Amino acid sequence: MTPAILCEELARVYDGGYRALRGVSFTVGAGEFVAVMGPSGCGKSTLLNILGLLDKPSSGHYDLEGARVSRLGDSERTRLRRERIGFVFQAFNLLPRLSALENVCLPMAYRGLSRGPREERARELLARVGLSRKASHTPLQLSGGERQRVGIARALANRPALLLADEPTGNLDSKSSAEILELFRHLHGEGMTVVLVTHDPGIGKAAQRLLRIKDGLLE
């Protein structure tokens, strides 16, 4: 079976010579739940940005669902990122003037889905994360845990095969963190591939597999 992710000797060198990644190789199977841990500045977020097609490696190869990403043009990368990858961020990245429903609708609007179907899908997703009654609330009217649940619903809007999360519980209290972790467990149980960057050992233990990065290298 083709793995969801195949990385071979990924390296990322920034202007000035800073080497964020120094040759990282691993695979993630379809439907696997993998946590990536390591100290600040070790290259975790750089790796996640490459996996999410937000950045390009300086050398090495990255295959996503069997496609060699380096061979894709910008429009193909954009389409693949929009249709096959969902993102969950530590800072939520919700638009403050839009309601929860409108925030979840955004990825579907960018994909060209008409208003009726995208609002129906958004309401289904908000119900799935327990926020049916807060669809009209703006982010400022929601708690941190609720904002992150909206963020997860938004990440699922286009039915991605791969869910990437960067410190999704970093701004949450312990109760909210546990609720968000339970959501990830459910998504993994339904067959979604999940790669999650975290400092939280509890979340690391909940994953099927743990990758530890230090100084741009897998330990």
Image (cartoon, rainbow, N blue to C red):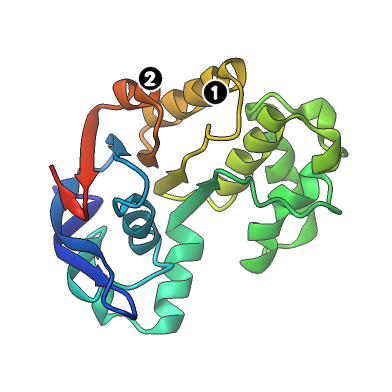
Q: Position of residue 211 (x, y in %)?
A: 21, 38
| Residue at mark 1 | 177
- Near mark 2 (Cα within 10 A), the count class, few <14, some 14-19 or many ≥20, is few
Does label 1 or label 2 sit earlier along the sequence? 1
> Can residue 112 be seen here?
no
Q: Name the image quarter holding residue 75.
A: bottom left
Q: Nearer the viewer, residue 148 or 45?
A: 45
Quarter of the figure with residue 122 = top right
Apparent side of residue 27 relative to residue 53 in the rendered image (left or right): left
In this view of the protein, which residue sits in the foreground, 44 or 40? 40
Q: Secondary structure at mark 2?
A: helix
The amino acid type of the residue labelled 2 equals: Gly
**Marks 1 and 2 in Cβ contact (< 8 Å):** yes
Going by the image, does 59 lie left or right of 43? left
Q: Position of residue 131 (x, y in %)?
A: 74, 28
Name which residue lies at 18% across and 56% down.
Answer: 6
Distance from Cα at disc 1 to Cα at disc 2: 10 Å
User: Label 1 is placed on what type of residue?
Assistant: Ser
Which residue: 18% across, 64% down? Answer: 10
Taking the spot 46% from the left edge, 29% from the top edge, the residue there is: 184
| 98 w.r.t. 145: above or below | below
For this orientation, the residue located farthest to the top is 175
The quadrant of the rendering that contains the C terminus is top left
Q: How many marks?
A: 2
* Residue tagged 2: 202
